[in-house]
Image (spheres, helix red, strand yellow):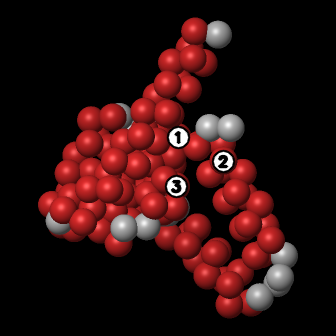
Amino acid sequence: MSRLAEFRAYRERMNQRILDQQSLVTNRFFALDGKAYEAGALDERTKELAGLAASMVLRCDDCIAYHVIRCKELGCTDEQLWEIFNVGLIVGGSIVIPHLRRAVDLLDEIREGESHSEVT
């Protein structure tokens, strides 16, 4: 199973497990998190790119992966992602480099999957 597929399956399974507990605080937080990325004065892509930069600085690999996936789903180009990777690196410093590596590896996996789907 690819890293992308593993990430998606794990995230969906664990989010459902957490939400099934019916914790008012947790469920409200999850709902608020989703609402924060909906279009408003800024479009969804811009918000996801901002989330990606923040996640890189905070060094959260799960968050980085989620935002890379969402950015690609929303039509962000590789060039746009690389600019955001650079912002995260400049703001976060060299400690971000390992997370940058994993983000680029995931981006490559997504691109490889896109090229396979174009062929088939």
- Relative to 14, is 104 above or below? above
The mark nearer the N terminus, 2 or 1, is: 2
Residue occupied by mark 1: 73
**Camera-side residue of 118 and 109:** 109
Q: Position of residue 116 (x, y in %)?
A: 57, 17
The residue positioned 64% from the left and 10% from the top of the image is 120
Label ID, residue 6 = 2
The residue that mark 3 highlights is: 66
Q: How many marks?
A: 3
Circle 1 residues within 10 Å: few <14, some 14–19, many ≥20: few
Amino acid under disc 3: Tyr
Residue 41: image x %, image y %? 38, 63
Quarter-wise, where is residue 75 in the image?
top left
Q: In which quadrant of the rendered image does the N terminus lie?
A: top right
Q: Is residue 30 left or right of residue 89?
A: right
Q: Position of residue 70 (x, y in %)?
A: 51, 48
Looking at this view, name the residue that lies furthest to the top: 119
- Would you place residue 117 above or below residue 36 in this image? above
